[in-house]
Image (spheres, rainbow, N blue to C red):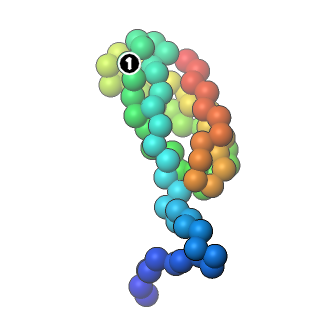
């Protein structure tokens, strides 16, 4: 089985790879940290451990395909 790029009728390009990259600011230590979000899931909760201060952050993320709608960091 082979994967190939699909061109959408009308010439509008559509990104078939729904990963969006964004940056968050760590609420504990203010460190800016890039993360990648799978935007194919409309709502998700991620728990990330900070590499600087080792404390965990809860990220609540709302997406539409290809874009992050809302991202909230909480301690
Ligand atoms: Zn930190």
Q: How many marks?
A: 1
Which residue: 42% across, 14% down?
30
Q: Is mark 1 within 8 Å of ligand 1?
A: yes
Categorize mark 1 by other alpha carbons within 10 Å: few (<14), some (14-19), many (20+): few
Which residue: 60% across, 42% down?
68
| Above/below status of 46 relative to 39 | above
| Above/below status of 18 relative to 49 | below
**Residue located farthest toward the left when viewing the structure as drawn:** 52
Quadrant (top left/top right/bottom left/bottom right) for the N terminus: bottom left
Which residue: 55% across, 67% down?
13
| Above/below status of 13 relative to 35 | below
Rendered image quadrant of residue 55: top left
Label 1 residue SS: loop
Quadrant (top left/top right/bottom left/bottom right) for the C terminus: top right
Q: Position of residue 59 (x, y in %)?
A: 56, 31
Q: Position of residue 26 (x, y in %)?
A: 45, 20
Q: Position of residue 69 (x, y in %)?
A: 65, 40
| Horizontal side, residue 72 vs residue 33: left or right | right
Q: Nearer the viewer, residue 36 or 51?
A: 36
Which residue: 49% across, 47% down?
20
| Horizontal side, residue 25 vs residue 31: left or right | right
Q: Position of residue 27 (x, y in %)?
A: 49, 15
- Return the residue at label 1: 31
- Does residue 36 show up? yes
- Does residue 44 show up? no
């Amino acid at each position: 089985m082979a994967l190939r790029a699909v061109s959408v009728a009308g010439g509008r390009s559509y990104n078939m790879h729904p990963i969006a990259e964004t940056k968050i600011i760590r609420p504990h230590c203010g460190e800016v940290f890039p993360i990648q979000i799978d935007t194919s899931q409309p709502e998700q909760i991620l728990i990330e451990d900070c590499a600087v201060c080792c404390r965990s952050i809860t990220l609540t993320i709302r997406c539409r395909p290809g874009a992050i709608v809302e991202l909230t960091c909480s301690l």
